[in-house]
Image: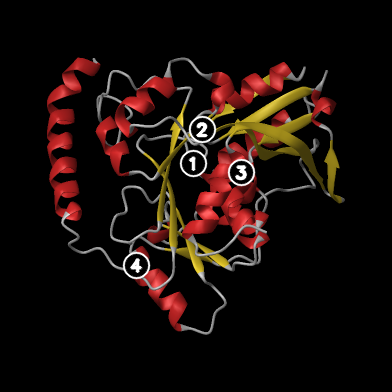
Amino acid sequence: MNILMQPAAWLYGQIVAARNRRFDTGIRITDVGVPVISIGNITVGGTGKTPMVQWAVDQLRHVGASPAIAMRGYLAEHGAESDEVLEHQSVMPDVPVLVGPNRVAQIQRHLEIPTKTDVIVLDDGFQHRFVNRALDVVLIDARHDLSAGHLLPRGRMREPGMSLSRADVVVLTHADRAVWDAVSWIKTHHQSTPIASCRHGWASLHRFTADGESSLEVTSLNGMAIATRLGVARSDSIRAEVMDLGGKIIEDFAASDHAAIKASEQQALIKASSRVDAILMTNKDWVKYKPLVDWGQLEAPVLVPQLQLVFEHGESALAERMIGAAGLESS
């Protein structure tokens, strides 16, 4: 079936190439007046941008910067609340999040008001070339073999591998779940190996009930009967983590990435809650479910894993590049 998509993929590739040639001339690229650090990728699906953006913000704040995040915000332009935006706000409530498809305009409007913002972190910015950036960071997910090079809609790639040549640094994510020689592929297209590699670990579990919030060790999952609601791009890895920790998935509510939690699904979660010890969902799901949850009917707590980036190598080197791009010095 994928081979039938090749003509569409070829046409898509021609459009991407023409677009990049135009940007390569510098046309329509705007310097917003403060350093911009872009975190992006060249594929669809989750590569770990959200925790990397939050890590970058933490690094910048640690040396005295006042960053803001700029992002398109999935569904935001249609009047719905973006789960990506809500997720950033739930973790970093005091960091401005600028939302909209025209990120140049969003940034400029923000900087025109009295603000401490002195650096912008562009969430999913590699293809958004309208904004001039001081540093382009591209994430490559070790879980997906990109060696065939298939572009959308035949494959997962938003741009061909050779586009990595315009990245300043490349970071390998989910390095502990590698299924191919991503390092060699990156070196071929970027002419250098990844500056850093990392995996995504669970630091703890946030437990939500009618009485409030508490924290649990991840080992608490051992022996628990779990229902999962995972509206993310790579839910299989989360289910695998639950089972690796000894949890027993009794019921799984499949959902597409960014999917809203409908009334019928709320009722299904309530029904399932009488049969399990807990309902587990990502923070991306929880920020949508939290204002809807009916604690009078839900009989099980909601568990939300707290992600943390665990670097296998290169954390200091990556932090130094980001801090330097922002015009600051490491503390």
Question: Which residue does the numbered mark 1 point to in the structure image?
Answer: 259
Closer-to-camera residue (2/315): 315
Rendered residue at 12%/26% (across/down): 7
In the image, what residue type sits under mark 3?
Ser
Work out which quarter of the rendered image holds the N terminus and state it: top left
Q: What is the distance, in whole Å, between disc 3 and disc 2 at their CAs? A: 37 Å
**Label number found at residue 104:** 4
In this image, 35 relative to 264: left or right?
left
Element marked by disc 3: helix
Identify the mark nearer the N-term, 2 or 4: 4
Q: Earlier in the sequence, mark 3 or mark 4?
A: 4
Please report whichever mark, 3 or 1, sits nearer to the chain's N-terminal start.
Answer: 1
- Dot 4 falls on a residue whose secondary structure is helix
Q: Are marks 3 and 4 in contact (CB under 8 Å)?
A: no
Q: Which residue is mark 3?
A: 316
Looking at the picture, how far across and down is residue 124, in whole percent? 42, 48
Residue 261, quarter of picture? top right
Q: Nearer the viewer, residue 243 or 94?
A: 94
User: Does the rendering let one see residue 83?
Assistant: no
State the separation of the CA atoms marked 3 and 4. 30 Å
Secondary structure under the numbered disc 1 in the rendered image: loop
Q: Distance between the Cα atoms at labels 4 and 1? A: 27 Å
Q: Nearer the viewer, mark 3 or mark 2?
A: 3
Closest to the observer, 160 or 282: 160
Specify which label sits upstream in the sequence, 4 or 1: 4
Quadrant in which the C terminus appears: bottom right
**What amino acid does circle 1 point to?**
Ala
